[in-house]
Image (cartoon, helix red, strand yellow):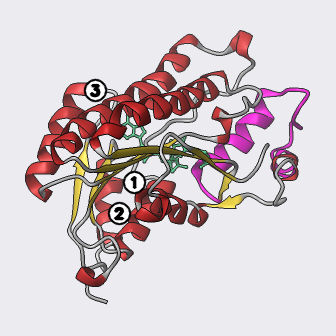
Amino acid sequence: MSAEHLPFSGKVALITGAAGNIGLATAEHLAAMGADLALLDLDHEKLEQARTGLGGHDVRINIYTCDVMDGGQVSQTVDTVVRELGQIDFLFNNAGYQGAFAPVQDYPDDDFARVMNINVCGAFHVLRYVAQHMITRKFGRIVNTASMAGVQGPPNMAGYAASKFAIVGLTEVAAKDLAPHNIRVNAISPAFMGPGFMWDRQVELQARAGSQYYSTDPKEVAQQMISSVPMRRYGNIDEIPGVVAFLLGEDSSYMTGVNLPISGGI
Ligand SMILES: NC(=O)c1ccc[n+]([C@@H]2O[C@H](COP(=O)([O-])OP(=O)(O)OC[C@H]3O[C@@H](n4cnc5c(N)ncnc54)[C@H](O)[C@@H]3O)[C@@H](O)[C@H]2O)c1
């Protein structure tokens, strides 16, 4: 189908963490809905691969190598996206880092700061600079990626859980500040999503970190995690983009400041 007849035709979506599992799956979904894409990530090579992989869609796809920790770089990149693609209607604010796995008393200071810098300061930089642009157009739809770890703190994940609780708070504040400008801000909180880098890494590192909550065998840890969610399986990465599209689109027109869990309690 030609892109101008699709639900998101004429919209431009900026996706951060676009070279990663969830970002890329969401890019594919939004492109299939007709949105032009600005793909932002730290990893230039993976961005190039992502653009090549998405080449079958009849939409504009630009890539931007940028470190979200650096507010100056983010500000410049947002300006470049607007110059090149004309506008930003949708933001999927999704770049993130899982951090170390260790009990809180042993959790490394430098990693805690790194997690906060990427997940909280990074998301804040992107949100504020994109919001400044959206305010000039009196239109914007923003989805921040939090996590079920930002709803209930899992063991050994002090940095990550603290950062994702912060994203839920940032979402609630931004929703109130930006509502007068016709900008809606919501969050998603995926639970255990796989297959993919974060799932494999967390199963491995939870087992290695050791705690009374998980086995030291990664295969058993995987089973323990899966047994703690209602669906008794990990969520597939492909089960996320439709939820993001719902929050970006007008089927959710009265929703702002909402954190949507993807799966029930852990
Ligand atoms: N996969 C899961 O199980 C899961 C569950 C809940 C929440 N999340 C969240 O979903 C988001 C995406 O995770 P994913 O599973 O796709 O992970 P991923 O590791 O595949 O992707 C993350 C991407 O973010 C990019 N990134 C990291 N630091 C950056 C920086 N400073 N500047 C720009 N880009 C940077 C990475 O290069 C990577 O491409 C993250 O915020 C993560 O915390 C993931």
The secondary structure type at the circle numbered 2 is helix
Residue under pointer 3: 70
Q: What's the residue type where badge 1 is placed?
A: Ala
Asked where in the image residue 175 lies, by quadrant, the reply is top left
Toward the bottom, the furthest residue is 1
Residue under pointer 2: 50
Q: Could you tell me residue 137's position as x and y percent?
A: 17, 48
For the residues marked 1 and 2, what is the alpha-carbon distance in whole angstroms?
6 Å
The secondary structure type at the circle numbered 3 is loop
The boundaries of the magenta stretch are: 195-223
Label 1: few (<14), some or many (≥20) within 10 Å? many
The secondary structure type at the circle numbered 1 is loop
Q: What's the residue type where badge 2 is placed?
A: Ala
Residue 216 or residue 22, whichever sits in front: 22
Residue under pointer 1: 19
Q: Could you tell me residue 52's position as x and y percent?
A: 30, 70
Q: What's the residue type where badge 3 is placed?
A: Asp
- From the image, state whether disc 2 or disc 3 is nearer to you: 3
| Residue at figure coordinates x 37%, y 29% from the top left | 124
Q: Which of the two discs, 1 and 2, labels the residue nearer the N terminus? A: 1
Is residue 94 in sight in this rendering? no
In the displayed structure, 30 sits above or below 205; it is below
For the residues marked 2 and 3, what is the alpha-carbon distance in whole angstroms?
23 Å
Quick check: marks 1 and 2 in contact, CB under 8 Å?
Answer: yes
Examine the structure image and report whether residue 17 is included in the region drawn in magenta: no
For the residues marked 1 and 3, what is the alpha-carbon distance in whole angstroms?
18 Å
